[in-house]
Amino acid sequence: MTSPQPVVVITGASSGIGRATAQAYARRGARLVLASRSRAALETVAQECRALGGEAMVVPTDVSHEGELRALAAAAVAEYGRIDVWVGNAGVFSYGAFEQIPSRTFRQIIETNLMGQISGARAVLPYFRRQGNGALVLVASLYSRVSSPLIAPYVTSKWGLLGFAEVLRAELRGSGIRVRVILPSTIDTPIYQNSANITGRQVHALPPAVSPGHVARAIMRAPHRRRFATSVGQVQRSVIVLHRSSPRVWDAVTRFAKDKLELRGGSARLSDGTVFEPRPEAQPVTGGWRAPGLRLAVLTLIAAAAGLVVAGRRTETR
């Protein structure tokens, strides 16, 4: 007798990484519980998943409300009897200098990206405890380990999420419950088009952008690996050492990248994006940001920055 397919709850399932992860699990025949703020968007994704061979139910959920996450976990268990994997993925983004970002925008990003993950853990852990097992997979970011100007709420939320996950890992060691963190770099999703933007400039994803499918595969593998944190996007991951070794150079490089690569090309109207309200329709898996030619430009920028660090150290030792 074959064992039943895993029950997987995915927040932020209506676009980008969440939608790609739902599709990937569906191809394996998983029983999916899909969550985001828009029922119509979720129904689109659920139909895709059923066509790919999975089961799928939808539970409209705003992760910034703890009670809705408790209801999500309860609905999953009521339908399938258990939860095997909880993928905390919902997230929103903004661009703007800290002093210009409205307090309500900053707070909502923290409520979604950080408190939504914390509340998700509170909701699912009692069921994992009862089962004696389960995997909590939290989608954090490269920005859990580095920083960049003009995205203070996002960086704050992702640094906090990694710290929370590390505490939870230690507290749950030996319980049969696994905590895993995924650290994507720039991923080719619509989060940039959907970001709040008070800069007045056009937003572009920082190249090179990685396929959401790569993140989906990392999420699916994470519960079965011993590794606590998995990075996705090796080119940008290489800059972590620069951030640690030379903050002055890092600040110069990120200011340049923000001005010349991320915020360029004409004016843009001020927008709250999807920080407060979702798009009613499902958003695509990809955002159209992959441009192979820019990969070399980014590598050149990283190499130049590394050269500056080496030159600076040589000067200091003379």
Image (cartoon, rainbow, N blue to C red):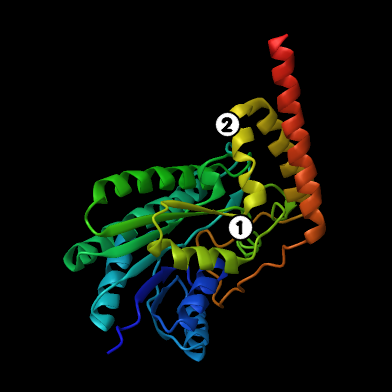
Q: Position of residue 42 (x, y in %)?
A: 47, 79
Tell me the amino acid under the disc marked 2: Arg
Q: Is residue 266 visible?
A: no
Which image quarter: residue 205?
Answer: bottom right
Q: Is residue 243 visible?
A: yes
* Crowding near the residue tagged with mark 1, few <14, some 14–19, many ≥20 C-alpha atoms within 10 Å: some
Question: Foreground residue, 234 or 161?
Answer: 234
**In what element is the residue under mark 1?**
loop
Q: Residue furthest front?
A: 1
Nearest to viewer (mark 1 / mark 2): 2
Residue depicted at 46% across the width and 68% down the height: 220
Residue depicted at 78% across the width and 61% down the height: 291
**183 relative to 167, above or below:** below
Q: Position of residue 80 (x, y in %)?
A: 27, 81
Comes first in the chain, label 1 or label 2 = 1
Residue wearing tag 1: 195
Residue 137 placement, left or right of 269: left
Q: Quadrant of the N terminus?
A: bottom left
Q: Quadrant of the C terminus?
A: top right
In whole angstroms, how far apart are the C-alphas of marks 1 and 2?
28 Å
Q: Residue furthest top?
A: 318
Tell me the amino acid under the disc marked 1: Ser
* Crowding near the residue tagged with mark 2, few <14, some 14–19, many ≥20 C-alpha atoms within 10 Å: few
Q: Position of residue 144 (x, y in %)?
A: 50, 45
Residue wearing tag 2: 244
Residue depicted at 60% across the width and 72% down the height: 285
Residue 316 placement, left or right of 84: right
For residue 164, the mark is none
Which image quarter: residue 16?
Answer: bottom right
Question: Foreground residue, 8 or 94?
Answer: 8
**In what element is the residue under mark 2?**
helix
